[in-house]
Each structure stands twice: as C-alpha cells, then as structure tokens.
Image (cartoon, grey):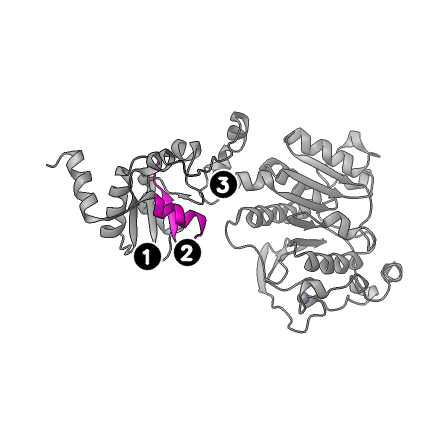
Amino acid sequence: MPSGAELIRRAKDEITEVDPKDVRGLTESPNGEVIVDVREQNEFEESHLPGAVHVPRGHLESRIEGAARDKSERVVLYCASGNRSALAAKTLKDELGYSNVESMTGGITLWKDRGYDVEVPRRLTAEQRERYSRHILIPEIGLEGQLKLLDAKVLLLGAGGLGSPTALYLAAAGVGTLGIVDDDVVDLSNLQRQIAHSNDRIGVPKVDSAEQAIHDINPDVEVVKYQTRLDASNIMEIIEGYHAIVDGVDNFPTRYLLNDATVRLQIPVVSASILGFDGQLSVFAPYDGPCYRCLYPTPPPAELAPSCGANGVLGALPGIMGVLQAIEVVKLVTGAGEPLIGRLLLYEALGTTFTNLKLRRDPDCPICSRPPGEISDEEMGVFPDYESFCAAAG
Ligand SMILES: [Zn+2]
C-alpha cells in the first residue's frame, strides 16, 4: 500500500497543476472557467479566492455537477496547500470524466503569501445561524441563499388576506426589508382571514399592525410602511429599488398600473387573486415571460369584474395562495427551482384541484413588446378611467 504522501505525489504526476499567478488572471478577467474551493466549510468561510464556488472534497462527487455542468469546461481546483485539490482533480479527471481540470499549486496559502486578493465572506451571527438553520440545511438555499434573503427588499401590496401570510412567512424566512403598502385600518370583518392582525388591533392601521406581527416573529426585518393607496402619482417612487413585488391588489386599475410600472423598472411581480373557493397565481417577470397585459390586454367589462366591491372568500384560501406567493418570492431571490413564470396556477378548493396552465408572451403586447425605456409615464396604466371603472362595478 502506498503512503498518503506517495498517493499525493502520484496524483500530482497524473494531473495538471497551475500556478497561482495564472489563476489570478482568471479571477480578474473570468473567461467561463470555474474556480472550485474544495476545502471544508469553515475554511471557505474564513476567506477564499474571488468568485470561487465551494464544493468540499467530501461532497465532490455529489455536488460538482451543480458547479460545473459541462465536463469539457476549464475547472481549477484549490485547497489550502495544493494536496487535497490534487486528489480531487484526479477524481474529476479519472472517475467523473472532466477533461480540462487543474489543481492550483500551493493552494490559498501560497496565493496569500503572494499578496493576492481574497474574498472574506459575510457571516451570520450565532443567532441568525440558529434561526435560519433549517434553510441553511437545504442545499438549494444554504448560507448563500440565506444571505440573499437577508439582502432582499420585497414590497407587499396590501396587508390583507394574501399579504398577511406572505408577510409573516417572508419575515420568518429572513427577508431583510419588507415594504408594505396599505391605507386601510384593521376591521373586525378582516380577522376571518387576515392573520397578521388581531382582535386587540381593530382600528389600528394595517401597516402598523402588520409591522407588529412581523417583529413578533423576527425583529431583524426592516419594515417600510406606506399608508397610502398605490396610484399613478406615487407608484414609481414607491416600487423603485425593490427586488420583487407581491401583488395582492384587489382591483384591475391598480393591476394595470402596477404591470406597466414593473415592466418599465423590470421588477418581477408575484401575483395572486382569490374569490370564493378559487385562487390563481402567476409570476410576471418582465421580458422573461408574459406580463399581465399579454394575458389581459384590457380589463373585463366592469359588471363582470368581481374585485371592486366586497366579495365572499373562504378564510383559509388566501392562506394557501399567500404562502405560495411567499415561496415564489424565496425562489426568485435565491434562484432556487423554477419560478411560476409563464404559467398560471389555478387552485380550486371545493374539488381540491391544482391546474397549471401555460401562458405565452404576446408579441404585440402594448407594453412588453417594447424596451422599458420606451414606456412613457403617460401610457402607464392607461385604459378607460380607473375610478369610473370601479364605480360602474359597484
Ligand atoms: Zn406584455
């Protein structure tokens, strides 16, 4: 049996090694190659090469394809001193069929000795580590995804039936900033479904009541309150800078206005609606999928528009749809999975059916068929006057 040192020597003979100075060139002007740190989690968190992805050697076989899908692309491995990465390079080459793999000589130790730049990753506090531990354990989210959530700014339109569960779950998930637009106060009739509010907060503005509920779950979330109605005069100012918008808007005029403004600013909207026992959900990601106007170029006739007045709804239904919205937001922020872009999900509670419909972009869409810079203020949300539209619906 060869000794450990002998095994490493042999591996180095069989693989290609690369000097840190050549890898430095790659970190400064990347050219499609993948730089992989094969050390342990704690070593990676201490500091690593700029742009490096982390695939610990113990998880090499199971995770490398997530980092380097194409087995012919250039993969540079490194560790602390160049030994573990040499063994890992041999595995990739001999057993996994990677044809262009190298190991960096001297590892990050030599890299640092030469005074090259390293990235010192942000860390979670001990409390955050514990609070988000169940997220960090999911590979699709992990520490990196949790940091993205902590940096995310998400705007909730409405703190009502849909906005309540969305707000609570996004707060619990650690979304760093939650904006809430709502001009209403908590009413007794809301409490059948709007679970962010409570009996002792009847009469309190919903933005304040929701803030209280959010901070009861997670005091780290920054809440930005807009106790107003979204309209043409304030929409651009309010929504700009948010990474995603959760739309629980209950009227068509605002939906059109929101659509046009978010296409212009290229902000994805996770949109849901509910009525009776039925819910609908879709993600409108500007230019990646259809926008709201691609599907509904004009609103339905006012007398058929159910959303302008008070309507009946099963109390738990917005819970389902709002939580689905929260999940879509987490996916958009972290990049996990396939968001519901170009698809419409229909949930019918009485029959317990979920139906997924494909949606297509309309090449003649009045809004998203043009580049965002061409959408003017005057055009936004324009169709027959909003107020009279809802007044007609009673
Ligand atoms: Zn469109």
Identity of the residue furthest to the left in this view:
1
Mark sitting earlier along the chain (2/3): 2
Identity of the residue furthest to the bottom in this view:
364
Please report the bounds of the magenta region as a residue range.
Answer: 21-39
Q: Judge whether residue 6 can be spotted in this image.
A: yes
Identity of the residue furthest to the top in this view:
126
Q: Is residue 238 magenta?
A: no
Q: Distance between the residues labelled 2 and 1?
A: 13 Å
Q: Are marks 2 and 3 in contact (CB under 8 Å)?
A: no
Residue 148's place in the image compared with 346, above or below, is: above
Q: Single out the mark in the foreground, 2 or 3.
A: 2
User: For the residue with label 1, is its CB less than 8 Å from the closest atom of ligand 1?
Assistant: no
Tell me residue 54's x, y (percent): 40, 42
Viewed as shown, does residue 4 lie left or right of 313? left
Where residue 324 is drawn, which disc sits there? none
| Amino acid on which the number 3 mark rests in the picture | Glu
Other residues around mark 2 within 10 Å, as few (<14) / some (14–19) / many (≥20): few
Closer to the camera in the image, 194 or 295: 295
Task: Identify the residue position indicated by label 1 in the image.
Answer: 71
Closer to the camera in the image, 191 or 28: 28
Closer to the camera in the image, 83 or 359: 83
Q: Do the residues labelled 3 and 1 touch (CB within 8 Å)?
A: no
Viewed as shown, does residue 311 lie left or right of 59? right
**Which quadrant of the figure has residue 53?**
top left
Tell me residue 366's x, y (percent): 72, 70
Q: How far apart are marks 2 and 3 (CA)?
A: 21 Å
Task: Identify the residue position indicated by label 3 in the image.
Answer: 144
Q: Are marks 2 and 1 in contact (CB under 8 Å)?
A: no
Q: Single out the mark in the foreground, 2 or 1.
A: 2
**What is the quadrant of the C terminus in the image?**
bottom right
| Amino acid on which the number 2 mark rests in the picture | Gly
Task: Identify the residue position indicated by label 2 in the image.
Answer: 32
